[in-house]
Amino acid sequence: MKHSIRFSLFAIAALAVFLGSAWVDEGMWLLDSINRLPLAEMKKTGLELTPDQIYSANGPSLKDAVVQLGGGTGSFISSEGLIITNHHVAYGSIQRLSSLQNDYLANGFVAKNRSEELATPTTAEVVESMKDVTEEVLSGTTASMTPEERTRTVQAKIKELEDAVPTEPGRTSKIAEMYSGVKYYLFTSLRLTDIRLVYAPPSSIGNFGGEVDNWIWPRHTGDFSLMRAYTGPDGKPAKYAKENVPFKPKRFLPISTRGYKEGSITMIIGFPGRTFRYREASGVEFARDETLPTTIELYKTRIDIIEEASKDNRAIAIKYASALRGIANTYKKFLGMMEGIRRSDVIAVKRAEEARFAAYIASNTDLSSKNGSLLNDLRKATDELRKLERKNLLLMNLTSGVNLLRIANRFASFVDTPIKDSLGHIVEPSEKERAPIMEFVNSTLKDTDPAVDKQMCVALMLKSAAMGPEYQLEVVREIVGNRLGKEREERIKDFVDDLYDGSDLITPAGCEELLMKSPRKINNDAFVEFARKIAADQRPVQAKVQEINTTLNGLRERFVRAWMEWKKIDVTYPDANRTIRFTYGQAMPIAPRDAVHYSFATTLTGVIEKEAADDPFIVPPKLKELWKNRDFGKYVDKQSNDIPVAFLTDNDITGGNSGSPVINGKGELIGCAFDGNWEGIVGDYYYQHDYNRSISVDARYALFLLDKFSGAQHLLSEMVIR
């Protein structure tokens, strides 16, 4: 069956309820849609670029200055591969490089020359091309297929198309699903694996305000860092080596010190993570009732353990800094999401619109025969998922939050996938084949404190024991039986004590020794045995979840198609899915509540006003001195007569956009997006123009810190500053 799909932008307002807003600035747009956006209106707010200067399939454009960097985004700001991103995007790398002797998290880092730049595990990807391959991907599907058959057919075709793309080392090809499977795009990218840390401010600047201010405006965080991409001497992607040379991007962004005013155009190109704006009401209800509250509960348990252990122990604080920041960020976001779903009444809004959709379907015999049960089928499948979600989330937290369990699973996988020769006979693994296991072990144990890991294991197993019988893990049920209260807690603690005491996996030396032993002896390790029991519980849950999600994906694809037919229009922009997107907006204030109005910009004076004796509001003495002496240099904002720190725009972004360049109408960098606001967190499900805002660090604050605070003029000299 051949699928022909047209995508246009007329009558956007007709999809207002479905997408959450009729505001024209809404949207995380695919780059090939830019020439169909309201460019005339954008020019009125300061756009001076042509669509081809923003994105061109045939030559350099702004797109080539943007990189997917780890879990966030970055952009090139020099011809020598220098990348600006958020401090919190680089945070994991900074933490990995930190120790009690070299505490780059607390003290910051400045490479005085190229030889001092530090290798990191971060990778960067630069999108080289994108192509609509919908017809090819769907060419083998038919309307009569079951969801499982359709999924298998589509996945096979995706693999075939990806494999058919001519590749060379350092280049990747990936097909991404859009609109729940209505459309598909092929992206080819250059993957750079030698990324080095160049500059990081101290956390008292880069994480000023910490979790207290996270997701909150006004904001005063200098959330930026610099990294550099390297290639081999031949200019091709290569792993870290001393002889590597800086990457030469096709395009880099000049930096503006002219600033902006309220209403000035702001453009962001980046790699947003996941949104769910096309999600049906029952799906949002499922998130509200199951996914969000269960994750909040489990993450709070993990956060409390790490914070208590880190309180008076800097070594432990460094080990768990990156993990803590990641789960604390999600924890607070999900709290805001719960509040936003309630405040916006998005479920009721979607249900009302779905009732009108159902009436339309029922009015036509042909449509009714095809889609009459669609909403009910979505609800039924979601109800099946409800029965599994709590146990599934507990298992996910256990297998990701207990580091020794992660190591044990790697050992179990190593045993289960033996090395074979050309005749299919099992052979002894070589040192090279064992090396990845030990790399993982060393990396994981470096950031593990055994006592903290043990506490985490106990706490999550107690969470399982406290759940209803249908959610309990079998291994927990075996341990506690019918015991309750203190007796149950002691049984689990005793079990975990024996687990850690009886395993070789607690030290790198023990892991290395065990890795040399026979599969039988590896399987006899206490933690490997435990990992296999957890896996026995997890496999059927994962299989059933995958089965239900396959059904839901098929239903959602039909839902989006039927909705478009009802509205007589095409979908405007797809949900975010970590593919490169463009969003445009304006510098804009916010009035989040009755009698509350916030300006669109903050200043260094605001940093000083927030100062407190305790973290996260400690201000470095040198920064206070610069403010007191008004030693602002050329970075002062003419309107405020102060150093600008952060600013607010109505650009439509989400997680994954962190570090994305904020670009003015001339194509110059004016900041880096680093957060959203509390009132707009529900935007992942339901966009509201009055409340959705993007928070960015001002480029002038970054330049001021590099120059006046850190004395990094050598880095400024390679930038184009206007």
Image (cartoon, rainbow, N blue to C red):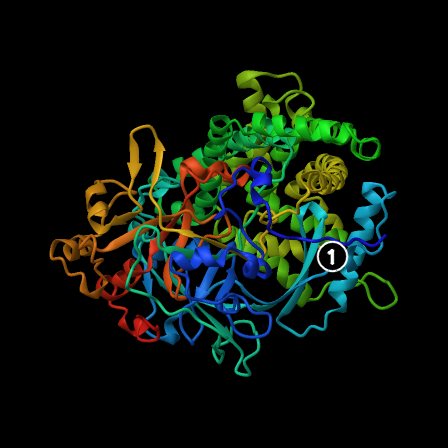
Can you see residue 158? yes
- Residue 148, by quadrant, is top right
- Mark 1 residue element: helix
Dot 1 alpha-carbon crowd within 10 angstroms: few under 14, some 14 to 19, many 20 or more: many
Percent of width and height locating residue 226: 39, 64
Whether residue 184 sits left or right of residue 65 in the image: it is right
Whether residue 465 sits left or right of residue 641 in the image: it is right
Percent of width and height locating residue 66: 49, 64
Q: Quadrant of the C terminus?
A: bottom left
Can you see residue 504? no
395 versus 698 height, above or below: above
155 versus 217 height, above or below: below
Seen from the viewer's position, the closer of residues 93 and 635 is 635
Identity of the residue drawn at 25% across and 64% down: 710
The residue where tag 1 is placed is 134
Seen from the viewer's position, the closer of residues 12 and 383 is 12
Percent of width and height locating residue 497: 55, 34
Identity of the residue drawn at 81% across and 56% down: 156
